[in-house]
Structure formats: structure tokens, C-alpha cells
Amino acid sequence: MGFFSPRQNDSAAKPLQSVFLPFPFVCFPLALVTDLAYFQTANVMWQNFSAWLLFAGLMFGGVALVAGLIDLLRPRTRPLRPGFGAILLYLIILALAVLNSLVHAGDGWTAVVPYGLALSALTFVLILLAVVASAGRYAKLAWRV
């Protein structure tokens, strides 16, 4: 059986985006941690870590976006699709991460402080909101009989 072929005993297929979506949700908060480390130490290594974490999060976020579009075409993923609010938050998070990555592309202290740090913190807060928005939908599915 292939990935797209349904089995008779499954009520829903596993969304393809769920494989890639956790990566940005880990990379972006870690970028905040490395920004804070750079703010405390002024060691350029932390700025480089932040830039690479943002890059990795954006790459996997882009793949998750494409996978989410594929999931929209798969009728068996309908029960596990995130709500409109969560999807909107995902897109805003990716847009902020692109902006944050552009800010981090600069050299030295001004590449992180204050705008890079503020964008990382805002991205983290929006990630928390997206997790809360998505968790409610999955919790309802987990408790159904």
C-alpha cells in the first residue's frame, strides 16, 4: 500500500505536513534563545547560530507549506486539518521569520539587537498561539469515540 492509498480501517489519513511542521516550531524558538545568548555575550557565534536556525526553519516551513497544500487535496486528511486561524498564524509566522532572517543577515550587533531579538520574541509568541489554536482541534479528535 502506498502513502496515498487509503486503508479500510483508518478513519483519517496522516497529514503529510505533520512530518515537516515541527521543524520550524523548534528552530524559531531556538533562534530566540541564541539571540538572547548573543545579547548577553556579544559572541558572533550566536548570531551565526541564529541565522542558520532561521534558515533551517524557513526551509522546512516552506516544505510544510507545500505539504499542507497537498493535504488540502487529500480528502482523507480533512478531520486532521488545522483551522483557518491556525493556518493564518502559520503564514504570519513564516512571514515574520523571513523578515527576521533578513534582519539577521546584517553584520554585528545591529543585526540582532534590537530588531532581530524583537522579531524572534514576536515569532515565539505567535508560535505559542498557533500551538494553542491547533491543540484544541486535535484534542477534540482525540476524545471522540
Image (tube, grey):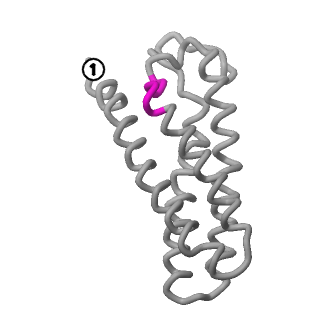
Q: Is residue 145 left or right of residue 74?
A: left
Answer above or below: position of 99 versus 138: below
Q: Where in the figure is residue 99, as x and y percent of width and height?
A: 64, 54
State the extent of the magenta-drawn residues as a range: 80-86
Q: Which image quarter: residue 106?
A: bottom right
* 112, 138: nearer the viewer: 112
Q: Residue at x 49, y 64 (%)?
A: 118
Q: Where in the figure is residue 94, as x and y percent of width and height?
A: 60, 45
Q: Where in the figure is residue 24, as x and y percent of width and height?
A: 57, 51
Q: Is residue 63 left or right of residue 78?
A: right
Residue type for callout 1: Arg
Q: Residue at x 56, y 81 (%)?
A: 38
Q: Is residue 134 magenta?
A: no
Q: Where in the figure is residue 92, as x and y percent of width and height?
A: 54, 41
SS at circle 1: loop
Q: Residue at x 47, y 14 (%)?
A: 9
What is the number of callouts on the image? 1
Q: Which image quarter: residue 44?
A: bottom right
Image quarter hosting the N terminus: top right
Few, some or many residues within 10 Å of mark 1 (<14, 14–19, 20+): few
Q: Residue at x 51, y 31 (%)?
A: 87
Image quarter hosting the C terminus: top left
Answer above or below: position of 107 versus 103: below
Answer above or below: position of 24 versus 41: above
- Which residue, given by chain and number where applicable, does mark 1 sit on? 144
